[in-house]
Amino acid sequence: MSIKQHLKPIAGVFASAGLALSLVACGGSGQAASSSNGSGSNASSDNVITVGASPSPHAEILNAVADELKADGYELKVVEYNDYVQPNVALSDGSLDANYFQHKPYLDNYNQEDGTDLASAAAIHFEPMGLYAGKSSDIKNVPDGAKIAVPSDATNEARALLLLQDQGVIKLKDGAGLEATANDIAENPHNIQLVEVEAAAVPRSLQDADFAVINGNYALSAGLDTSKTLASEGADSEAAQTYANIVAVRKGEEDSPKTKALVKALTSDTAKKFIEDQYKGSVIPVF
């Protein structure tokens, strides 16, 4: 489907086709899983910590701290998933000791929908949305009628709208916050038009739009130079406080020896340096 088929003025009816709580920090779809640090489907021996993760950046960050865990007497086994459901299924049924791919609102929604009792053990990182140049490059001089590609799901579009507001492109109604929709736009001086695209496809829409607001993980997957964003969500933003990616465990195991060791490794200086050096602002440590 072409970009024109997705185009609609922001004064029109806003249609949210995606999940209300779309993941900020995991790409891909389907239910395939693969092991990147060994195989095996059960979280078993006392000295092995089996963690489910999306491939980038989560599995990469985990593998970067494997030696930290080894120093504490644990072998790390990372099982990679390319969907948003199976890592929680595997954690619930005991196949994993923990998973690392989601933010707290998604976990809360999953628990409510599936009757599970999973818990957050620690917040590790945030993947800020970035504003990228397309046909236009000066966000301070937005062309009248500019087309701006944004994720079509409710949560990520709200974040995109807040970022556009921070740059003075639009103004939202007071209190709209992370539940903002296009209907909450109070001022639109440049008569911009939103191009609503499924989050993973926004990078492909960049060439046809004036600007695009893209999730950090999808920018990485698309090979975009994340150091060249025109603007991005800050580490102290409302989105960062809400959508930090977490280590999830079964309730009651937040303070188990394995969980403590995993959290210690993921909040170590090694982890922080790896995140900062590897992702250069497209992934931000929150510890």
Image (tube, grey):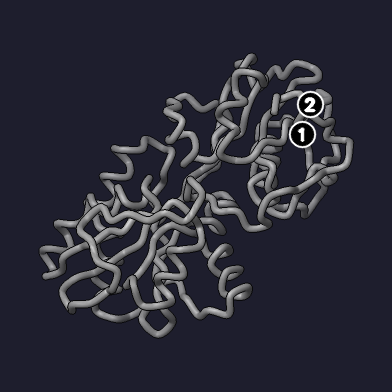
Q: Secondary structure at mark 2?
A: loop
**Percent coordinates x, y for residue 240 in the rendering:** 53, 52
- Quadrant holding the C terminus: bottom left
**Percent coordinates x, y for residue 21 in the rendering:** 63, 58
Q: Which residue is mark 1?
A: 170
Q: CA distance from mark 2 to mark 1?
A: 9 Å
Of residue 193 and residue 228, the one placed in the foreground of this image is 193
Is residue 70 toward the left or the right of residue 273 in the image? left
| Residue 174 sits above or below residue 118 on the image | above
Instruction: Name the amino acid type tagged 1.
Output: Ile
Between disc 2 and disc 1, whose residue precedes?
1
- Quadrant holding the N terminus: top right
Instruction: Name the amino acid type tagged 2.
Output: Ile
Proximity of marks 2 and 1: CB atoms separated by less than 8 Å: yes
**Percent coordinates x, y for residue 103 in the rendering:** 51, 60
| Residue 286 sits above or below residue 94 on the image | above
Mark 2 or 1, which is nearer the eye? 2
Residue at point 60% right, 23% down?
206
| Residue 264 sits above or below residue 216 on the image | below
Residue 192: mark: 2
Of residue 60 and residue 83, the one placed in the foreground of this image is 83
